[in-house]
Image (cartoon, grey):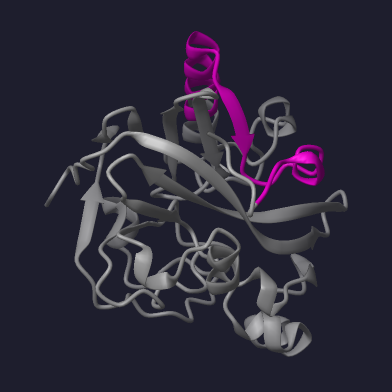
């Protein structure tokens, strides 16, 4: 098993991708579905997550029924403009420009176009890749693993200079988070669903795959952020999402 995929360059800029809006019945609360692009000063393009499957942009109601997702929530807005190709185009990029894909974990709102980047290696937690199929959604493992070169991590890993992959099981068996340093912004922590929103910390990560691990890693991530004075981008924050800068804008 490979534990590292060294990037040659340092992170140069970061963009937040808008993969649409979803309403979680609990609360209820409206959450943004996000992905990320990181460009390095060596010209590498890293894509983190790909949002919902394309079928949700074609007919969200039919897709929701097919996946039995309605008991958890409902898609509010996923259009062709929220798919990876269109989001990359906002940044002047094409799918073929992506040099590395990262799966933070394999729930339905993160893996929709995982198979859409032929030849691009996928970095993922070894625990997640060991599953028979991607997690997808509560007993509905509808996807197969794409045929790719998989770079599997089982611990915190330096992906390249100033770019750390943090192994944070809890929300999912192979949840990953990311810490990177940008030239102007400084340190940025991308929690992904290791901390979907700040309130999860007070709620003790209720409903997580492994609550105790989620609590542990949530605390660890926030301590790291405090130590480095990092800007934190949460995975699905109802408060942060509406005001968060998104593609075509960049954090530099």
Q: Quadrant of residue 206?
A: top right
User: Residue 60 sits in which quadrant?
Assistant: bottom right
Residue range in magenta is: 217-246
Q: Position of residue 14 (x, y in %)?
A: 51, 42
Q: Nearer the viewer, residue 86 or 139?
A: 86
Residue 68 visible within the image: no
Spot the residue most to the left.
1
| Looking at the image, residue 196 lies above or below residue 221 | below
- The answer to whether residue 125 is visible is yes
Q: Is residue 49 above or below residue 55?
A: above
* Position in image of residue 139 (x %, y %): 53, 72
Q: Say whether residue 199 is left or right of residue 84.
A: right
Q: Is residue 111 above or below residue 7?
A: below
Give the quadrant of residue 122: bottom left
Q: Tell which of 64 and 161 is nearer to you.
A: 161
Image coordinates of residue 77 in percent, x first then y, are 79, 70
Image mark count: 0
């Amino acid at each position: 098993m490979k534990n590292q995929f060294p990037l040659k360059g340092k992170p140069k800029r970061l963009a937040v991708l808008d993969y649409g809006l979803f309403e979680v019945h609990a609360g209820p609360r409206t959450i943004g579905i996000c992905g990320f692009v990181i460009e390095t000063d060596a010209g590498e393009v890293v894509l983190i997550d790909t949002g919902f499957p394309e079928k949700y942009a074609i007919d969200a109601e039919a897709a929701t029924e097919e996946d039995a997702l309605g008991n958890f929530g409902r898609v509010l807005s996923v259009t062709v403009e929220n798919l990876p190709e269109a989001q990359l185009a906002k940044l002047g990029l094409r799918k073929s420009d992506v040099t590395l894909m990262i799966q933070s974990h394999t729930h339905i709102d993160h893996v929709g176009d995982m198979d859409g980047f032929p030849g691009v290696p996928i970095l993922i937690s070894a625990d997640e890749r060991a599953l028979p199929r991607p997690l997808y959604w509560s007993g509905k493992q509808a996807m197969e693993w794409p045929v790719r070169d998989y770079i599997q991590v089982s611990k915190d890993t330096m992906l390249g200079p100033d770019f750390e992959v943090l192994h944070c099981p809890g929300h999912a068996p192979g949840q990953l988070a990311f810490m990177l340093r940008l030239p102007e912004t400084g340190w940025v922590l991308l929690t992904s669903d290791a901390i979907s929103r700040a309130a999860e910390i007070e709620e003790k990560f209720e409903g997580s795959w492994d609550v105790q691990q989620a609590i542990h890693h949530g605390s660890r991530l926030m301590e790291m952020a405090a130590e480095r004075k990092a800007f934190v981008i949460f995975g699905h924050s109802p408060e942060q999402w509406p005001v968060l800068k998104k593609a075509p804008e960049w954090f530099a």
